[in-house]
Image (tube, rainbow, N blue to C red):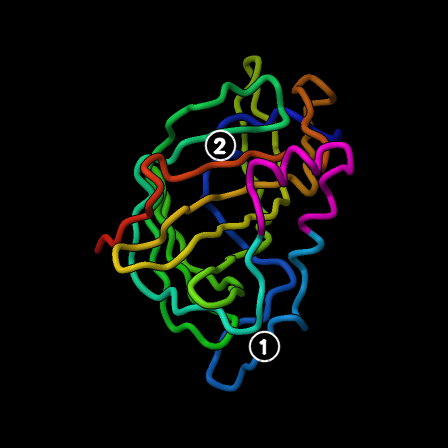
Amino acid sequence: MKRITKIGTLALIFFGMVFASCTKNDENTIILIGEERYIDDILTVIPDTLKPMFDAVFGTIPQGPVPPRIEGSYVVDPKQRITSNVSTWPLTVLEPNVYLRFSDQHNGVVAMDLNEATEQLTDTVFVMGHNKDFTIYFVENKAYDVPYASQTYHVRVKRGIIMKGTMNDYGMANFSIASIIMEAEDDSGGLMGQYPPGSFFIYRDGNGLAENFEW
């Protein structure tokens, strides 16, 4: 299996999410934010030489033991890619809308439904923050096939997803998404290009607000 650096557009959209190292929420589960800290595992894969670039664009990550209530339904419209350390990817590209629904928030754990393009999923994510500022984060593991050069190759990707914003009466203001490659490999024998761990893509809602939207 070779490390990959060019996964294709399928690697950059939110579908097929499966949690790793994630405690599921139920009525007997209490997770103290500050105790569950695998967001650090996501961020530490970014090389030190690229961290200033990431921080300058993505900005401060809200932290704290008492996040705001994020329950509700929202739409990211338009979803706009604004930067990446992968030079082969064009910037300021509009991508399919992202539809989000959060429910059953229990301390720092919340159920998430997400719909993008033709895929829909339901899983559990972590949330932290202070006052109206929040950070949502999780690790995704997925495998899929990619047609390339008249063949189909099997791809496995592990990436961290971080969403942040500020709750207001209209939805989630200043909403941003970071997608960070943690591991990636395929069976193309090096024919497909490669994204090393720490490759990242940053998106924002194009109008600055993930509006309240029932879907």
Whether residue 118 is visible to the viewer of this picture, yes or no, is no
- Label 2's element? helix
The three-letter amino acid code for the residue at tag 2 is: Leu
Residue at image coords 47%, 36%: 203
Residue 67, which numbered label? none
Image quarter (top left, top right, bottom left or bottom right) of the N terminus? top right
**Residue 22 x %, y %:** 60, 65
Residue at image coords 68%, 43%: 182
Name the residue carrying label 2: 10
Residue 1 appears left or right of 164? right
Residue at image coords 43%, 68%: 68
Residue 213 appears left or right of 143? left
- Displayed quadrant of residue 63: bottom right
**Residue 60 x %, y %:** 58, 49
Segment colored magenta: 42-60
Residue 138 included in the magenta stretch of the image = no
Residue 47 included in the magenta stretch of the image = yes
Name the residue carrying label 1: 31
**Residue 9 x %, y %:** 49, 28
> In this view of the protein, which residue sits in the foreground, 130 or 29?
130
Furthest residue toward right: 48
Compared to residue 176, the image places residue 20 above or below, namely below
